[in-house]
């Protein structure tokens, strides 16, 4: 794989086809070609961005983005407590989703997906 191994990941609204306002720059940490021409990749999130505008170019969706600087609220504030609660709830949702996805991959006999879930393990708190 050529280039800097970074790209943006954005959710696409299935009902409208439009991109979410925010996304995450990811770095490809592992890339293995598969016999059918696809690739098995592993990625790590690097930094968040706001999608200012996007367009199609050479078969790819590209975008102009604004990088987001995260600012942590001070300890002991309600804002910090709210953020910790949201973080906990998001982690619980992720654990639940990953557990269901692992079980479905195992039941359906998808070895690549099962191996991917084995590698990532459980999300940390």
Image (cartoon, rainbow, N blue to C red):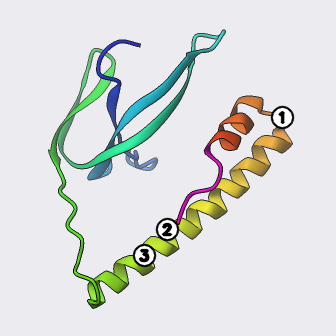
Give the residue at mark 1: 109
Residue 15: give x, y in percent of width and height: 44, 50
Tag shown at residue 7: none
Residue 4: give x, y in percent of width and height: 29, 22
Labels 2 & 3 near each other (Cβ < 8 A): yes
The reply to whether residue 18 is visible in this rendering is no
Q: Nearer the viewer, residue 116 or 101?
A: 116
Quote the CA–CA distance across marks 2 and 1: 28 Å
| 18 inside magenta stretch | no
Mark 2 Cα-neighbour bin, 10 Å: few <14, some 14–19, many ≥20: few
Q: Secondary structure at mark 3?
A: helix
Tag shown at residue 90: 2
Labels 1 & 3 near each other (Cβ < 8 A): no
Quote the CA–CA distance across marks 2 and 3: 6 Å
Quote the CA–CA distance across marks 1 and 3: 34 Å
Splitting the image into 4 quarters, where does residue 96 fall? bottom right
Q: Secondary structure at mark 1?
A: loop
Give the residue at mark 3: 86
Report the magenta residues as a range. 120-125
Mark 1 Cα-neighbour bin, 10 Å: few <14, some 14–19, many ≥20: few
Q: State the residue at coordinates (28%, 14%).
A: 58
Mark 3 Cα-neighbour bin, 10 Å: few <14, some 14–19, many ≥20: few
């Amino acid at each position: 794989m050529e280039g800097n191994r970074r790209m943006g990941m954005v959710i696409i609204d299935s009902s409208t086809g439009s991109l979410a306002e925010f996304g995450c720059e990811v770095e490809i940490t592992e890339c293995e070609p598969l016999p059918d021409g696809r690739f098995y990749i592993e990625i790590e999130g690097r930094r968040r961005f706001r999608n200012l505008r996007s367009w199609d170019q050479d078969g790819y969706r590209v975008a102009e983005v604004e990088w987001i600087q995260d600012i942590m609220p001070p300890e002991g504030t309600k804002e910090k407590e709210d953020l910790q609660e949201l973080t906990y709830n998001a982690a619980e949702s992720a654990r639940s989703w990953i557990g269901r996805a692992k079980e479905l991959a195992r039941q359906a006999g998808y070895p690549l997906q099962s191996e991917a879930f084995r590698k990532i393990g459980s999300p940390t708190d």
